[in-house]
């Protein structure tokens, strides 16, 4: 259950959880934009994954080895399969087939969908009504945001990317639920994921997988290494893990529905991409759904009252 105990700077732990979820939205929105920039270069999905796992793993491996005894490593290996290798490789591979706009819909919309479905199964299909309504609202808004990309002229193999994005969303939702179930501390979870992803992936990448990193510019490599390896793999994942424990898996995942809208606004200012009426309407609907889904079952007034106390 979400906690109301005192957190950082005198805020309740629930308020800190929502702040952490807001940071995740900002980081993942930037991830979509940076990945869109990277897709215009020569880097392969395997290069992007190597930057994510290599940088984050090298930064966290010493801390993980010092802090976690070997008898506890199997649990972190499982988390690394879902929250590291599974999610990362599926997302980056999906970018090779489908546009980034599809990732915004199927990944950021798929994570709350899969989370709610798995929680509903575990709870015997007894879910709060406001969560179901919020999921439907967010789904409609996401379809509006991605309407032109999803229902316009499409390449014959785009469906492969869409399937990969949905599988990536399932992998991340599984990671979030497992981490909450095992009550693993957020930074230990992220350091374990990064460490084992490094150990499992980098030898395979260096020996067998195709590479184009040598043909890329130094600026592009630095940008992708910092964003993929630090911002996305450590900061965003750590904040999501924290929010997951403080406000709940369904609430934290529902906040991710805001990512495509924020990405669209960022792309408008940074990439000079147009914002149509349909996209703006979709952003508003998604925002309503995310707020409703993140609120406790007793409603927004109870949330505000607990925040004041």
Image (tube, rainbow, N blue to C red):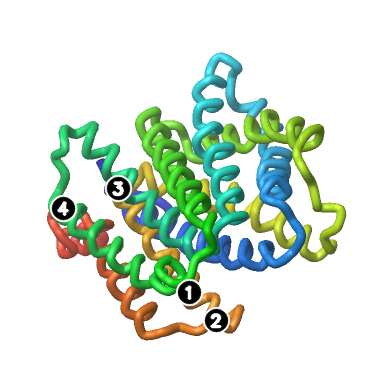
Report the residue at 59% width, 19% height from top: 69
**Closer to the camera in the image, 254 or 209:** 209
Q: Which residue is mark 1?
A: 264
Disc 1 to disc 4, C-alpha distance: 30 Å
Residue 234, percent across and down? 59, 48
Q: Earlier in the sequence, mark 2 or mark 4?
A: 2
Residue 297's disc number = 4
Q: Is residue 118 above or below residue 229?
A: above
Q: Which residue is mark 3?
A: 250
Q: Please give left or right for residue 152 compared with residue 294 in the image.
A: right
The single residue placed furthest to the top in the displayed view is 71
Dot in front, 1 or 3: 1
The reply to whether discs 1 and 4 touch (Cβ–Cβ < 8 Å) is: no
Q: Please give left or right for residue 7 compared with residue 132 in the image.
A: right
Disc 1 to disc 3, C-alpha distance: 24 Å
The single residue placed furthest to the front in the displayed view is 156
């Amino acid at each position: 259950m979400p906690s109301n105990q005192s957190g950082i700077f005198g805020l309740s732990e629930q308020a800190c959880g929502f702040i952490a979820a807001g940071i995740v939205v900002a980081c993942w929105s930037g991830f979509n934009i940076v990945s869109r920039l990277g897709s215009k270069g020569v880097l392969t999905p395997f290069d992007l994954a190597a930057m994510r796992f290599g940088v984050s793993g090298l930064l966290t491996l010493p801390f993980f080895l010092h802090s976690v005894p070997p008898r506890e490593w199997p649990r972190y290996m499982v988390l690394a399969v879902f929250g590291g290798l599974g999610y990362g490789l599926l997302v980056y591979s999906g970018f090779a087939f489908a546009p980034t706009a599809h990732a915004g819909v199927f990944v950021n919309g798929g994570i709350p969908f899969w989370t709610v479905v798995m929680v509903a199964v575990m709870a015997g299909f007894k879910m709060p009504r406001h969560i179901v309504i919020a999921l439907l609202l967010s789904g409609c808004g996401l379809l509006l945001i991605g309407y032109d990309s999803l229902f316009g002229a499409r390449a014959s193999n785009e469906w492969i990317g869409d399937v990969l994005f949905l599988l990536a969303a399932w992998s991340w939702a599984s990671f979030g639920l497992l981490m909450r179930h095992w009550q693993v501390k957020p930074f230990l979870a992220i350091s374990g994921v990064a460490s084992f992803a490094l150990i499992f992936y980098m030898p395979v990448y260096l020996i067998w997988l195709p590479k184009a990193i040598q043909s890329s510019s130094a600026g592009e490599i630095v940008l992708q290494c910092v964003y993929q390896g630090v911002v996305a793999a450590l900061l965003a994942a750590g904040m999501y893990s924290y929010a997951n424990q403080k406000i709940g898996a369904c609430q934290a995942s529902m906040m991710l529905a805001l990512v495509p809208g924020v990405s669209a606004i960022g792309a408008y200012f940074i990439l000079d991409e147009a914002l149509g009426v349909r996209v703006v309407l979709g952003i508003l609907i998604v925002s309503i759904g995310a707020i409703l889904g993140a609120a406790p079952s007793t409603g927004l007034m109870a949330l505000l009252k607990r925040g004041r106390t």
